[in-house]
Amino acid sequence: MSLAASVILHWLTGDSGCFGAFLAGVAVLACFVLAVRGIIVLFRLVIRRTTLRLAFSYFLIGILPIPLLAALLLLGNYIEAHQFMATRVRREVTALGEAAAAKRALPRVAADPSGRVVLSEVPWLKPGQDAGWLGTLARPAFLGVNGQLWLAVPEPGGARAARVLRFDDPDGPWLQDLADRTGYEVSASLETSSRSNNGISITTSDEARRDRARKSASSDSASVRPAGAPPPGRGIWNGEWIRAFYLETVANAPAADEDAEQDVAILKARSSPHNVEEQLFTQGVKDIARAARLGFLGLVGALLLVYLAAVAVAFVLAGSIARNVNRLTRAADAVSRGDYSVRIKSKSRDQIGDLTRSFDAMAASIEQSVADRVERQKLDAELAMAATIQQKTLPPPTADLPGFSVHAHSDPSAEIGGDYYDYMVAPDGRNVAALGDVSGHGLPTGLLVGMAKAGLSTLVETGHCDGELFARLNELICRSTDPRHYMTLAMLNYDPVTRIGRLTNAGQLAPYRVSAAGVTALELPAFPLGIFPGKTYPTREQSFASGDRLVFFSDGLVEAVDANDEPFGFQRFERVLRENSGANAAGIAAAILAGVREHAGSRPFDDDCTLMVLTFA
């Protein structure tokens, strides 16, 4: 927006002044901030996904170094070729000068021990001039004379004398001889160098510039190619794009500060990579050069193959990790949607593979747990329905029959209890009341209770009673189950006309008779039903007066324990009956239940608690 405002303001006014500069600065800053934020968002987007993160990391490790290594190798080879060419050019200059001086066809200059010229065959050096540089020559060195480049070749023996030649003479043979010796396109020039904080600066002197213009006018190029050399080739391998420079301060330069301007000789050479490579591997025996070349190329090729193989392996591993991670992510999403059947089935043997197999095991465990929970829910629903059916099979808790009234209470400790009570009128007019207890809890117990109730009702309706009824019911239970499941049962067969009741018991707790005479337990020991086939069960007659109560109960009441594991017991049960002997049936039942709950406190009952009180008319 700042940039747009600056452009609009400049278009309207022609000159936005300092305000425009301010807006431009704000625009640049805004662009920089946006660029930084864009890079941060892109980086977060990359690192959030494992696939992109691995691809980015392997790009940095495996791909990006390839062009950098190639550039480094190219730069190193170029520097090596440059140094090789520059060194060879200088070495050939030395050899060229020494060969020319040996022929004694070059002008000679000499100086005395004080450095004064005593002999000079060149016009630019007069006798008597200072030429101290003659005493410093250890090898052929360059001289800068009036913008011209000369070469001074010292005479052997340590004499202060030298042979000199005009090295950059376009009409002389020296550059051509140097080109022929090296095989490069060469040139030589005298330049002026100066030092600064930014490095070395090279400039061309006026005389050298004029001389170079003259050479350019008389020749197509200031450079000299080897005699008979073909024209420059094309391409990276045959193109003459390698340029070498050799710089050397002239020997006759006056002593000055390092930052002062000085004349320098510059030798330039140009060649192709093919030519330099041929010279590098030149040997008297071609097989040696071939072996060196093959060794070098073989090492480079092996290094490249190893690197490419490492990159390929890295990308294969990265791809494997990325695939497993993506499959793991998709599987986790499926599990989160409730599909627990998804499996990854990875064949990888690394830690990611171990993780995927652990995920498969976890998904299988969750799937099994969910299936088990569904089955448990179905079973719980069935048990709840069975418990409801069982409760509905019990008769109402209160009823008035001819001869006595009934008040009952049943509290199962599990969904399906084992206690059972029932009352009915037999076909001959007798009243029947029974209370039983089946061992255990749960669905088998409930089935046995249902079977016992159906069997008892059927036997009563068909006229069976007392011990003979119990014997038939015992045979039925023995055929239907094993001795681990048995049933205790107490039954009263009461004739309201004679007020005589016949009590039959099969292992059930003895009922209590509550009358004006007190509280009496009607003991009648016998084995439970379903354990021993062929057993007989005793029956005893009892007469009941009006107002008498007969209390049937299950063992869950007397076995209820408190926090110290002390059961409620028969003594407490009898005391409650005595203390409430004047109460009606509901009062007696309530007193018993209250006493048991007070004794147990917060501890739950371990067994079913069933109570049935008969009040005789």
Image: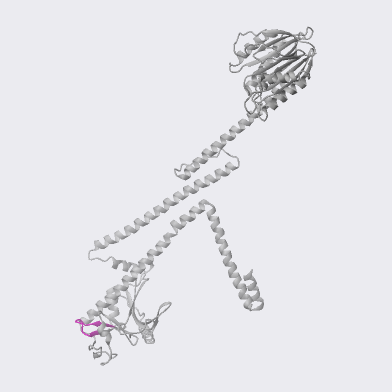
Q: Position of residue 458 (x, y in %)?
A: 70, 12
Between residue 229 and residue 70, name the one nearer to us.
70
Q: Position of residue 497 (x, y in %)?
A: 79, 7
481 falls in the magenta region: no
Residue occupying the point 58% across, 42% down: 334
Quadrant location of the N terminus in the rendered image: bottom right
- The colour scheme is one colour
**Is 63 left, or right, of 334 in this rendering?**
left
Quadrant of residue 265 in the image?
A: bottom left
**Is 374 left, or right, of 292 in this rendering?**
right
The reply to whether residue 285 is visible in this rendering is: yes
Q: Position of residue 193 (x, y in %)?
A: 38, 81
154 falls in the magenta region: yes
Quadrant of residue 461 in the image?
A: top right
From the viewer's perspective, is residue 146 above or below residue 307?
below
From the viewer's perspective, is residue 89 above or below residue 427?
below
**Is 15 left, or right, of 260 in this rendering?**
right
Quadrant of residue 171 in the image?
A: bottom left
Residue occupying the point 57% across, 58% down: 41
Residue occupying the point 73% across, 19% down: 577
Which residues lie in the magenta part?
Answer: 151-163
Quadrant location of the C terminus in the rendered image: top right
